Structures are given as C-alpha cells and as structure tokens.
Amino acid sequence: MLKNSRGNTLIIVLVTISILLMAAVLLLPSLSQRESTSERVYHNLQVTEMANSTMQSLLTEPKTLLNAAYYTGSTPFILTTPDGDKVDVYIMAKNEAGQTLPLNLINAVTHYFEVSAVYGDSNHNKTKDADEKFYTSKTISSNKKVVETNPQKPSVKFIKYLETAKDLYFDITTEPNFIVKIYKAVKDSNEKYTGTSTLASFSRSTSTGSKYVVHNAVSGNIFCIKSVNPYTNMESECVFFELNTEGNLNDGLVIKIINGQTIYEGVGPELYTQGKLIITSGVQYTQTSNKDYINYSGDLGVTVSTNALLSLASNGHGTINISSSQGNIVIEGNATINTDANSKKDSSITLTALNGNIIIDNSIITGGRDITFNAKNISASNAKVQSDSGPISFIINSSSTSNKGLIKVPGLQLNQNASASPTQYLTICGTVATGSVNGQKTFVTCAP
C-alpha cells in the first residue's frame, strides 16, 4: 500500500512538471513577443521625441543646426542617447518641388524643413533591411517659409575682347549654385540704363572657372548681366557693361555707379559720370596714343582702387586730371598715378574735389612737372608724391578761420618743399618723412 502511494505521488509530480514545461514552452514565445513589442514601442517613442526636439531647435535656434556639422543631407549625424542607444538624425530643407537644398541656398529659396530620426539602421541607408529587427523611424516637416528675396548682383571681371572674332570674355561670380544670364540693354540720354528681355548670344567658356563669352559683340553694345536663382528663377538687378572699343578694354575696367545702377566699361583717356566713378584694381592703363591727356570725372566721387595704374607716356606734354564736383577723390593704397609729361605749358597732375576731400594715403603719385591737390581736406599719410621739375601744391578750399581745412602728412614722402595754402584757413598735422611743407617737417599730432 505504501509503495502504491509513493508511486502515485511520483506520477503526479512528473505530470505536474510536464504540464509546467509545456506551459513554459507555450508561454515563452508570447513573453518574447511582448518584450519585442515593448522594445519597439520604446524606440518608436525615442525617435519621435528626437525628431520633435530637433525640429523645435531648428525653428527656434536655426544657426545652431544649419551648418556643415549637422546639415549633411543624405548622410546622418549620429546621436548617442543617455542609455547608450545610437540614433541617426537627418536635417534638410526642401523647396516647393521637394528638392533638397544645399545649405547656402536655404535663405534664398521658399522652403520647408524636414527632420528624420532613425533607430536600428546599422548601415545608415535610411531603409529597413532584413537583419534590422528593431528598425524604426520618424519624419516630420515644418510649415513652408516663403522667401522672396532677389539674388545679389553678380561680380563681373572683364578678361579680354577679341575684336576680330567679336568675342567678349568675362569672369562672372554669383552666389554659389546660381546661374548667369546676359541680356541686351539700352541707355537713354540721361545715362539711364535698362535691360531688355532679349538674351544676348553667350556661352560658358571652355576654360575652367566661371568664365563666360558674349558672341557677336561690337562697339556700342550694352549688356545686362544677371544672377539667377535656379530654384525660383528670380533674377538679380542688372550689372551693365558697355562695350566701347575706343577705350583700351584689355587694360581693365572702370565702374560707374549711377542711381544705384552698376555699369562696367573699358578704361580709356576720358571718362565721366553723373554718379561715382571707380577705377578697378585690374586697371593697368598707360595712354600712349595721340591723346595727350587722361581726364576722369565723377560728380559723386572718384576712386582709384588698390594696385591700379594710370600712366601718361606722351611726347613731352600732357595732363592727368581727376575731379569730382560733389564727392571725394580717393587714391587707394599702392595705386599709382604717373606722367612723364614735362612741358611748361601744362600741369602734369591735378586732383580737384572742391566740395569734398582728397585721400591719397599709401599711394604713389609722380609727375614730370606740376602736381596739384585742391579740396576741403587732404589726407596724404605715407603717400609718395614727387615731381621731377615742377611744384607740388596742396590747396584747401576754405575761407573760414572757424572751419579750417586739414592736411594730414604723417610719413609723407616728398622730394621737395611743397606748398600748402591758404595758410590762414588750414591746419597741418603729422611729420613729413622726406621733403617738407611750407619749409617745415613736423606739425601738430594728428587726432586718431
């Protein structure tokens, strides 16, 4: 009887164990599935929170994320969460057609932001692959931001004009990824330039870089050069170029700025504008023709840019005259004005700004005979002004002892005793490096 009792107990235990094992076998997949589901829910919440917080940062502090470190297009930047998980984050701006914009075009194009956060993407291809069990992602988009800003004007540098082929070459620089259009233009009697809707015949040069060639270009042609946003087709204002083969185009360009318009043309012996005249840095102009003068005038000012050269190599006579009726005359550092003229009947170099200032700091002005500066104030710090056989004169256009003109001479290099007048209406400051002014080298200290 005892044996049967013990046997029955063992059978009951074995049956119970078998039932428990069977239950465990049946329950394990369910428990595992619940665990997987729980992990997926966790990572889904994780990427949703990451996408939302990134978009919030992008909208409130765009400068923090709109840079090369984070705005990487199809390549994510990878964030590590506090619990050690790695999440791929994509930030991009798209135009209205859904095209991803390069970083430098975002503020030039109507756009919206798109942020994606991805977990479990082991090969970072933004796609769920077969072996990526816990792959999960979240993508959100912002509202559209309308941008209607016109592109900036292009920068234009003349290269050469081939008169036989009638080809006009430019180096044109625009905002990155923008394109160039060149239209025909016209000018009225008041120097008002207007672009037309007719495209000129032009093409990209086969040379490397940003070189363009206008075909069938002849003297008198005017062109309107524009920068174009390829995503919106919005165009910049015109940069005008007037082809004048009487000027020596291959010696560089000058710029006329009139009522906000920018007009380029070739340098020549005589230039005038109602606006401002700029002799660009690329100008290396020596007048050797039968014209014995260089006459430049801009009502609102004249600037001879750094490293520019204006030279007159005439047969014993000739003048260089630069004037402005209302603005300043600025000869920038390392710019050179030179004439070999030595005739007694002509002043070699004259700069006149009766209602403005003359600034020749760090420039070089040399002549065969007379050199004259006439303005309300004159600054000649560290300039080199030398004449072979004529006087050097600084003339202040003032008639008030209470509002005297100022002549600055610190470091001025002269090769003679220059004159400054009228003495009762001017103040001189600084110390002349060589030569003297009114027989004196050292004057009061110049104010900062």
Image (cartoon, rainbow, N blue to C red):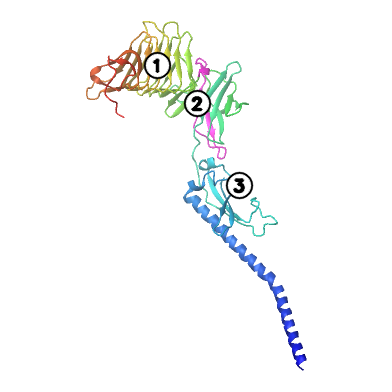
Q: Within 10 angstroms of label 1, few (less than 14), some, or many (20 or more) residues?
A: many
Point out residue 382 in the picture as x, y percentages from the top left corner: 37, 21
Q: Do the residues labelled 2 and 3 touch (CB within 8 Å)?
A: no
The residue at the far front in this view is: 2
316 displayed left or right of 81: left
Cα–Cα gap, marks 1 and 3: 57 Å
Q: Is mark 3 on a helix, strand or loop?
A: loop
| 243 inside magenta stretch | yes
2 or 3: tag closer to the N-terminus:
3
Q: Within 10 angstroms of label 3, few (less than 14), some, or many (20 or more) residues?
A: some
- The numbered mark at residue 75 is 3
1 or 3: tag closer to the N-terminus:
3
Q: What residue type is labelled 2?
A: Phe
Residue under label 1, please give it: 365
Residue under label 2, please give it: 240
Point out residue 240 in the picture as x, y percentages from the top left corner: 50, 26
Point out residue 170 in the picture as x, y percentages from the top left corner: 55, 25
Up/down of 185 relative to 86, above or below = above
The residue at the far bottom in this view is: 1
Q: Where is residue 341, by image quadrant?
A: top left
Q: Where is residue 366, by image quadrant?
A: top left
